[in-house]
Amino acid sequence: MKPKSPEKILQYYQKRIFPRIEKYLQTPDFPTPFKVPRKCKREEDFFWQVVSDYPKRKGKYLRPALLCLTGQAMGVKLGDLLPPACAMQISEDWLLIHDDVEDDSPKRRGLPALHRIYGNELAVNAGDALHNIMWKVLLDSREVLGEKKTFALANEFYVQLSRTTLGQMTEIKWTRDKKMRFNVSDWYFVADGKTSYYTIACPMRLGAIVAGANDFQLEKLAQFGVLLGRAFQLTDDVLDVTGDFSGRKEFAGDIYEGKITVLLAHLFEKANQVDRKKLKSVLEKTREEKTKDEVLWVVEKMKEYGSIDYARKLALEWKDKATEYFESELGFLSKNPYRMQILTIIDFITNRNY
C-alpha cells in the first residue's frame, strides 16, 4: 500500500477529532442555582465565541495524529484513541493562547492572535477555560478505557506539562534577562521540554499507554521524542527566518521576541566583533523598539555567517538519528499502514514549509 501524503494523514485525523472537540465547546449542565439566566445569554455566547476561537482555527493536528498512529501501530482501535487525542489537541490550543500572550505574538494560524483581538485578560481566561475542558475530555476517557489507563494518561499529561511549563518559563526568563551568553546546550534544555516532550514524546507515549505499553517501551518513546523533537524545533527556527507564511505567521518572530535559538547561538559565535556588538544592541531592544530593517539585518547576517545552513544541517542530522532509532528500537510499533505513516511524518518534520 502506497503511504498517504503527510498532509492527508493529518487531515484524516483532524476530521475525526475536531467534531468530538466541538461537542465540548458549549455550556455544561450547571446545578440549578448556577444556571445562566436568560438575560445573560449574550455574555454566555460571547464567552464561547472567545473560547472556541483557536480550536475552530484548527492547526496541523500533528500531536493527536502521532498519538493515534502510535496506538494503532500497537494494535489499538482508533475509537479508543480519540478521547486522549482530543485532549492532546485542546492542550495545544490553550497553551498557544497563553504562549501568544506571553510573547505578545501578532498572529496565530493566519489571523490576529487572540489577545490582539480581545485583550490579554479575556485571552488568558479563554485559555483557562480550554485547560479545564482538556481535563474533562481526559476524564471522559474512563468510559472507553477504564480507570487505570485514564489515570495513567492524566499522569502523563501532568508530567509533560510540568516539563513544558518549565521550558517556557526558562525561555521567558532568559529572553527578559537579555541572556547573551548561551550555546546549543542551553537551547536543547528549552527545546526538549517545549517541543521534544510535548510535540513528539508525549503524544506517542499517550497512544502507547492506551495500548498497554510497558515502562521500557515508554522510555524508548521518550528517547525517540528527544531526537525527532530537536529536528522539529530546529526546522521551526529555520522556517522562522526563511519561510513564506503568506500572512499566516510573522516573519522572523523569534528575532522580534529576542528568543534564544541555535541560529543566534551560531551567529554570536561566528560574527566578528563589530557585527556581534550590533547584534547585541538589536537583541537588547524590546519587540516594539526593534525596526524591520534591524531584524532583516540580523537575518542577512545569519545567511552571511552560515547560521541558517548550520541549523538546517543540524535538523537533518537529528531527523536521521530519529529515523535510525525508530527502525532499530521501536519495532513494537509494528502494525501497518500506521508504522509506515509514522515514517512519513518523520520526513514531514524537516521537509515541511510551514
Image: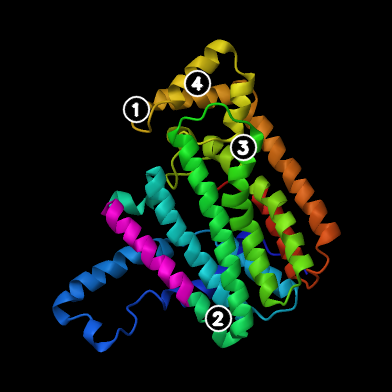
The residue pinned by badge 3 equals 186
Amino acid type indicated by mark 1: Glu
What secondary structure is marked by label 2? loop
Of mark 1 and mark 4, the one earlier in the sequence is 4
Q: Residues within 10 Å of mark 1 (few under 14, many from 20)?
A: few
Q: Main secondary structure of the magenta part?
A: helix
Eye-nearest disc, 2 or 3: 3
State the CA–CA distance, disc 2 to disc 4: 50 Å
| Region in magenta | 118-136
Residue drawn at 49 percent across, 36 percent down: 174
State the CA–CA distance, disc 3 to disc 1: 26 Å
Amino acid type indicated by mark 2: Ser
Eye-nearest disc, 3 or 1: 3
Q: Residues within 10 Å of mark 2 (few under 14, many from 20)?
A: many
Amino acid type indicated by mark 3: Asp
- Tell me the tag on residue 289: 1
Give yes or no for contact between labels 2 and 4 (Cβ–Cβ under 8 Å).
Answer: no
Give yes or no for contact between labels 1 and 2 (Cβ–Cβ under 8 Å).
Answer: no
Q: Position of residue 242 (x, y in %)?
A: 55, 35
The residue pinned by badge 2 equals 141
In the image, residue 169 above or below residue 238: below
Give yes or no for contact between labels 2 and 3 (Cβ–Cβ under 8 Å).
Answer: no
In the image, residue 261 above or below residue 152: above
State the CA–CA distance, disc 2 to disc 3: 37 Å
Of mark 4 and mark 3, the one earlier in the sequence is 3
- Tell me the tag on residue 207: none
User: Quadrant of the rendered structure where residue 331 is?
Assistant: bottom right
Q: Position of residue 55 (x, y in %)?
A: 43, 65
| 304 is within the stretch colored magenta | no
What secondary structure is marked by label 4? helix
Residue 303 seen from this side: no
The residue pinned by badge 4 equals 279
